[in-house]
Each structure stands twice: as structure tokens, then as C-alpha cells.
Amino acid sequence: MAKDIYIGEVSENKEIRPDYYLMKVKLPLSFGNPLPGQFVMIRIAGLHDPFLSRPISIYSFERAKSALIIALLYRVVGKGTQILSGLIKGSQVEIHGPLGGGFEWPEQKKQVVFIAGGIGIAPLSLMAETLCRDACLPRESMTFYIGAQTAQSVIGLERLNDLCYNVHVCTDDGSLGRKGLVTGLFQKDIKKYPADATMVYACGPKGMVRALSKLFRGSAFQCQVSLEERMACATGACMGCVVAVRGEQGALAYKRVCADGPVFDLQQVIWDET
Ligand SMILES: Cc1cc2nc3c(=O)[nH]c(=O)nc-3n(C[C@H](O)[C@H](O)[C@H](O)COP(=O)(O)OP(=O)(O)OC[C@H]3O[C@@H](n4cnc5c(N)ncnc54)[C@H](O)[C@@H]3O)c2cc1C
Ligand code: FES
């Protein structure tokens, strides 16, 4: 999975909410149009502390005359993202990508449901936008469920309200939308969606993804999930990001989130039940 490494220029990096940043990076057109679900490994050009780049999903992109501008929506959680948050306009970053495969198309499905937890909204927003633009899916057929800790951490709502007819929000503390978990909110509505005619796209913290896995187990729902694992090489070489999946005829197999994912069929992923 040899992908190019580009030197990009930060054209914007603003804090849109406490600890949430939107960074725009100008890249050569040869980077190509990324697929929804793909990600980049990013680090400051020439800086090797922390040594490893950090994986961030592509939130949106636009083609300008002589450059491609990608937008990354990220939350500051540790040293790597803290360093990114300090970058100013004109800073140079090393971008490896676009990496991984994108979400599958919904094909014949009549309903599309997105379920995002926290910053999981990033790859799903690009998918919703792409389905509107390229698959001409009507707004009425797309529903978004967003869960976050507090109102402060519900990001990108305006863009989603433009794309989807129904956007349901919930927060752990009830400061915006319903109080509770996004999986609970979706579960209340699940009967509205015919399982065999609905495609679900999901991304969020492990707890949310596990809960969805339980909810869909044995059902006809098809759910494409973008998984988040810690990554080192992001080229498929180190095996540091493997997840257990059901391989051919249900046999246990291991897949690398960076090279074989990050998008998987949720029903194929095997969770450690301990
Ligand atoms: C394919 C992919 C796409 C991602 N897209 C986004 C995105 O669009 N926006 C965004 O904000 N984050 C995204 N992440 C998560 C992001 O990569 C991590 O938050 C980041 O690497 C943390 O680096 P750090 O040095 O700031 O924190 P660290 O100091 O390395 O860790 C701080 C905390 O974050 C946790 N953490 C670290 N890496 C990950 C990870 N990969 N997944 C889950 N938890 C992690 C650690 O367990 C620890 O609790 C994505 C991860 C993957 C694998
Ligand atoms: S991070 Fe090395 S194989 Fe995925």
C-alpha cells in the first residue's frame, strides 16, 4: 500500500470549540480526490517528536485552481494533537495519504442512517455529502444520529442539517438534544427502518461500536463502520492495528485497520467479550 508523502501548507487551523480544531491543508492536486472514510497520517514536517504521525480522517475537501485543500476536524487528546493545535497559517506538515479504503456505496438501499459518536462525525459527514452530491440521494432518505458528551462537543451540525432531513442529537448530560447514548436513541427508532433496505454507516468510540454490534447481531442490517485503532506505520507492515474478523466460512482472521480498513462490515468484526 505505497502511498505518497506530501508536504502540505496549513492554510487555517482554528479552534471551533474548546479542544476541537478545524485544520485546512493545501496539497498538490496530485493528492487526488479522497474517498469518504479515507484518512491521512499527519505530522509537522521535519519534527520527529512525537515520532509517529497521527491518523486523522478527511472531513471535507475542495479543489482550487492549483491545489487540493483538505479539512481535518480533530480533538486534542494528547501530545500529537496538542502539537497540531499549535500550528499557524503557513506551517508545513507532512501528509501521508490518502490512506485506507472508503465506505461502500449503499447500492439498492432505500434508507441511509449515520450513527456518530463524538469526533466520529468527521468521516461520516464527508460520506453524507458525497451521497448527496454524487449519488443524488434525497435528503429525506438520510438520517443522522449524533451522540456527544456535552453540547460543546457537538460539532458540524449546520453542515449535516443541510444534507440530511432528520438529524437527531443526544448528549450524555442532556445539554443538547435528548439525554443519553446515541445507541439508545437509535434503538428507540430502529423499527422505522426496514433492516434489509437500510444501510448504516457508523463511527465513534469503541463502546458505541460494540453496542451497535450487539444491536445488529443476527439482523439483516448492513453496517459499515470506520474503526479507530492506534497506528504506527499505517502501511500494513507492523501489524500494530489488527482487529479480529470473521474470515471465509466464519474462520477467525486478522485484518489491519490501516491497510484493510479503516472501514469494515460491522457484522464481520469479532469483539473481545471479556
Ligand atoms: C483511521 C482513523 C481516523 C481518525 N480520525 C480522527 C479524526 O478525524 N479526528 C480526531 O480527532 N481523531 C481521529 N482519530 C483518532 C486520532 O488519531 C487520535 O486521537 C490521535 O492519534 C491521538 O494522538 P495524541 O498524540 O494526541 O494522543 P495520545 O497521547 O497518543 O493518546 C491520548 C489518548 O487518546 C487515545 N488514542 C490515541 N490514539 C487513538 C486512536 N487512534 N483511536 C482512539 N483513541 C486513541 C489514547 O488511548 C489516549 O487515551 C482517528 C484514528 C484513526 C485510526
Ligand atoms: S499501523 Fe502498522 S500495520 Fe497498521
Image (cartoon, rainbow, N blue to C red):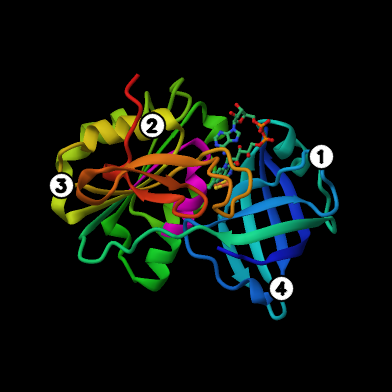
- Residue 28's tag is 4
| Residue that label 3 marks | 220
Q: Residue at x 78, y 39 (%)?
A: 83
| Residue that label 2 marks | 208
Judge: label 3 CB < 8 Å from ligand 1.
no
How many numbered callouts? 4
Give the vertical position of 55 relative to 131 (above or below): above
| Magenta highlight on residue 157 | no
Give the CA separation, mark 2 to mark 1.
32 Å
| Residue that label 1 marks | 49
Are circles 4 and 1 on residues that touch, CB within 8 Å? no
- Location of the N terminus by quadrant is bottom right
Give the CA separation, mark 3 to mark 2.
19 Å
N-term-proximal mark, 1 vs 3: 1
Indicate which label's residue lies in the foreground, 2 or 1.
1
N-term-proximal mark, 4 vs 2: 4
Q: Residue at x 15, y 38 (%)?
A: 218
* Lateral position of residue 26 relative to residue 40, left or right: right
Are circles 1 and 3 on residues that touch, CB within 8 Å? no
Neighbour tally class for label 2: few under 14, some 14-19, many 20 plus, Cα within 10 Å: some
* Lateral position of residue 122 relative to residue 46, left or right: left
| Magenta highlight on residue 124 | yes
Give the vertical position of 271 relative to 202 (above or below): above
Q: Give the range drawn in magenta.
A: 114-127
Are circles 3 and 4 on residues that touch, CB within 8 Å? no
Are circles 2 and 1 on residues that touch, CB within 8 Å? no
x and y, in percent, of residue 223 in the image = 29, 48
